[in-house]
Amino acid sequence: MSYAKDVNIGENESLYMLKIPHPYYLCSAEQSRFMDEKTITEFGIDGFTLMEIAGTRAADFIMSEIPANSHGVFFCGKGNNGGDALVIARLLSQQDFNITVCFLSGTEDLSPDADKNFRLLQKLETDIQVLKWEDFTPEDYDFIADGMLGTGLNTEVRALYSDAIEYINKQKAPVFSLDVPTGLNADTGQIMGSAVQSDFTLSFGALKIGFYLNEGFDTAGEVILCELSFPNKYKNPASYLIDEEWVDANSPSREKKKHKYDGGVLYIIAGSEGLTGAAVLAAKSAWSTGLGAVVLITPKGLLEVYEKQLVQIIKKPIGDHDDVYFKESHLADVLEVLKEKPGKLLIGPGIGRHEETIRFTQKLLTAFEGDSLIDADALFALSKWENWDIPDSSDLILTPHPGELKSLLNKELSNDHERMEAVITFAKQNGLTILSKGMPSIVGTESGVPYLTGYDTRVFSRAGFGDVLAGKTGAFWLKYSSAELACFQALLNGYKGSKQYFATNSGSLEPMDII
Ligand SMILES: NC(=O)C1=CN([C@@H]2O[C@H](COP(=O)(O)OP(=O)(O)OC[C@H]3O[C@@H](n4cnc5c(N)ncnc54)[C@H](OP(=O)(O)O)[C@@H]3O)[C@@H](O)[C@H]2O)[C@H](O)CC1
Ligand SMILES: [K+]
């Protein structure tokens, strides 16, 4: 995997490079071990040095949070995670912290680097209390360092470790987990029997993907990356973290954007009787991004609703006065509208699940040669379609919530890690982009390396919010000509909207609040 990834942002553009800084690489435990090992054996920085760097960075962070003279307890396993804790204990003891070190598996069987650090600790002329878990008597500690297990966790946490976890989780003192909260699977974000509930996780060398999947988000607390001296050539991501800064840095400049969407139209096929709200939300949210041209295609019987609610938006009524949902007989007229100006299509919000609408959707997707964002009920139509017949020229974005994803894949997905794996495979096999809503939201692309949100995006699976997200994604797609950037921008835009709302309101968030 190279540093940057190729993303084509439009026919006339030269190849555009999406640059993602290393701090946003999410790694598996194996990838972390690979970096560690290669840096030691091939590049030539030894493990003891890496441990000293990890410990130094972590100690600096703890000192920025905890005042000197505080009393901290360090729980250490026998592996290198324990070694990291011993480095920090040594450094803080020299800064007037009061230190207790508690070993979970004794001191006889420490890893070589942990053992070396234990000896250094003993050399200090400082009063450090060292004991085994069996002899541990709780005191009022000011903070807790969790150096029991890191990426070496191999099964459900064993006895003693689980006792210590139970003890730690009952304490009020802030907990700093080193590298990974003990008991959290760094790859899947699942809890292996039990896990330390951390206030801060100081992740060494790279962020672990498990912090953002399943229980990881609620277990790891605030995640802080402590960089190590790994050469970039050893850094391979399992995924990328979607971050505002790099997304903005990769989005084309305002000038370019303006030029890019001049003349481009977002066509929206949405709404049916009883579900016109979805069409209104999708159209309004697309319009709110500053996109000049949004065209809502609607069955004629619903025109009156939209005339009142969507004043600025161009409406193209199709069919007869008593048509209140899309039918196969509308196909030719809809295709005529889609030919009027170049643009992209957003299809699905609130179109309903009439047999005729399903057939209309499938036939339209077969005949339309442009790019389509497929959402909501149009995803249902896709899931009812055995052999998709969609032109190769059409780029697709699919925006399923967890239930829609299951129907689409015809597969039970029991957790977020499985969901991510399924998204990766599906996007790659079908050469499309998927924005899988949930926590996290996962953007899967043809490249095979997905992107995850590091913040709560569950709201987009709720009624109405998905329509807003679809409208924004469609509009940003037209603006940036990149399906990936469109998904990132829409997710971030929605997130910012909800943050802004909660900064001044305490009531429950409604879809209109984030438009
Ligand atoms: N990111 C980096 O490159 C660096 C990481 N460092 C730190 O090193 C750890 C990884 O160290 P490692 O020694 O490989 O593993 P751990 O310390 O996490 O744990 C290994 C020991 O834990 C025992 N174990 C495993 N699973 C369990 C369990 N379920 N219950 C109890 N004990 C368990 C295992 O014992 P076995 O008897 O099963 O062999 C191991 O002894 C990484 O996370 C970082 O913190 C470096 O310091 C710097 C570079
Ligand atoms: K740990």
Image (cartoon, helix red, strand yellow):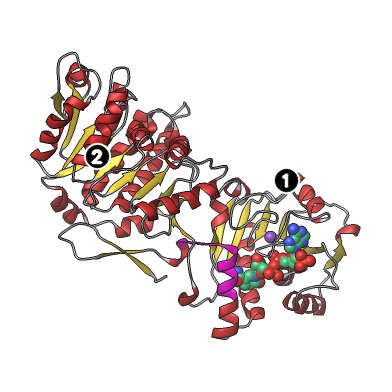
Which quadrant does ligand 2 occupy?
bottom right
In the picture, the quarter occupied by the N terminus is bottom left
Looking at the picture, tell me which residue is in the foreground, 77 or 188. 188
Relative height, residue 326 to residue 208 (above, below): above
* The C terminus sits in image quarter: top left
Element type at mark 2: helix
Q: Amino acid at mark 1?
A: Lys
Give the image quarter of residue 385. Answer: top left
Tally of numbered discs: 2
The disc labelled 2 sits on which kind of residue? Leu
Query: In this figure, which residue is indicated by the disc labeled 2?
Result: 365
Q: Secondary structure at mark 1?
A: loop
Q: Position of residue 88 (x, y in %)?
A: 69, 68
Please provide percent x and percent y for residue 283.
25, 32
At a point 46% along the width and 27% down the height, the residue shown is 508
Asked if residue 31 is among those painted magenta in the image, a careful observer would answer: yes
Most common SS among magenta residues:
helix
Direction right: furthest residue:
135
Is residue 55 among the parts visible in the rendering?
no
Q: Is residue 359 left or right of residue 336?
A: right
Q: Which residues are magenta?
A: 24-36
Badge 2 density bin: few <14, some 14–19, many ≥20, Cα 10 Å: many
Disc 1/disc 2 C-alpha distance (Å): 57 Å
Quadrant of residue 34 in the image?
A: bottom right
In the rendered view, tell whether residue 194 sits above or below residue 34: above
For the residue carrying disc 1, how many other residues have a C-alpha within 10 Å: few (<14), some (14-19), or many (20+)? few
Q: Nearer the viewer, residue 93 or 1?
A: 1
Q: Which residue is mark 1?
A: 172
Whether residue 394 is situated above or below residue 112 in the rendered picture = above
Write the residue at 76% across / 44% down.
Answer: 170
Does residue 90 appear to the left or right of 235 in the view shown? right
